[in-house]
Amino acid sequence: MEQQQQAPAGPAFGRKIFFLNPSFSVRTHIVTVLKILEFEVYTISDYRRVKSYLRVHHDAILYINTETQMNIPAWQNLINSIKQDDVFNSTIVGVVNEHLSAMELKVLSEDPNITGGVFHIEGQFKAMLPTLARKLDELGAKGRRQYVRTICMTDPNARFLWIQDGKMFTAQIVDISTASVAVLITPKELPFVQGRGEIFSTIQLGQKQIQTKAKTLVIKPSGNNYAAIFMINDQTPQESIQVIREYVFETLELAMLKSVEGMSIDKTDYVAAAKAQA
């Protein structure tokens, strides 16, 4: 069952989605599948770290598991503090729980600060997932983008290799998604990709390599070189696509951790505040 309130659509480039303290089952059956559906999803294990992420990443969607760490009044205090602070209040907050009592469901679904929906799973992961995905679409989680991408320019092991006219070429990958790859090529290499249609290529990501056919989508100047964008053939095996997806999200996760590195934790005692209000 899901209870929801109205919330504004997202920015053009979508919203990052954070799951705070998700259960193992939610990680397995919800978070993993949302990544396959091309939502940009992250997990946070400690509520004291939440505001650090929201301080850096505005317009995010935050789904809280209210079953552990604190009681529901304390969680409501945390949510209220987010929505009252100009630094964080563009965040859309929702709840994803495996179990909720009727009273808890009523309290949370009537909270005006919870506009991302209250999702009560009760073991019905497959039934709940389409509803959650629709809600994320309503909230503009993807924006105009259809695929999650990661930048690779600082990774020397992210390479694009192809053979053309009996010659082997290798290029640095600029960025990549499960649908396309952008690479940096020199003027000398330009004739070996321009107007070639599909080329047999190898995508190297760390120690893993993927063989695929890549179709030239667009080539545009980039400084003294060129950026060439290739579409990854839709006949590429799903096992290979999964390698790309894992690389994308692992790289994004590292960048996410780096973005909040050194930030202090939230030391507010939300439980004590809730008791004082009772």
Image (cartoon, grey):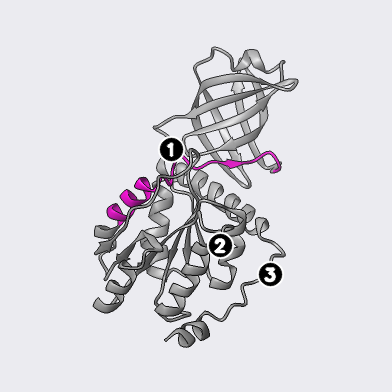
Upstream in sequence: badge 3 or badge 1: 1
Residue position marked by numbered label 2 in the rendering: 85
Estimate the spatial distance between the alpha carbons at disc 1 and disc 2, rounded to whole Å. 31 Å
| Vertical relation: 171 (above or below) 273 | above
Task: Check disc 1 and give the amino acid type.
Answer: Gln
At a point 50% along the width and 83% down the height, the residue shown is 271
Task: Check disc 2 and give the amino acid type.
Answer: Asp
Residue position marked by numbered label 1 in the rendering: 146
Upstream in sequence: badge 1 or badge 2: 2
Residue position marked by numbered label 3 in the rendering: 264
Q: What range of the chain is rendered magenta?
A: 129-154
Q: Position of residue 60 (x, y in %)?
A: 50, 53
The answer to whether the residues at label 1 and label 2 have Cβ atoms under 8 Å apart is no
Badge nearest the viewer, 2 or 3: 2
* Element on which disc 2 rests: loop
Badge nearest the viewer, 3 or 1: 3
Seen from the viewer's position, the closer of residues 103 and 113 is 113
User: Left or right of 13: which side holds 161?
Assistant: right
- Quadrant containing the N terminus is bottom left
Upstream in sequence: badge 2 or badge 3: 2
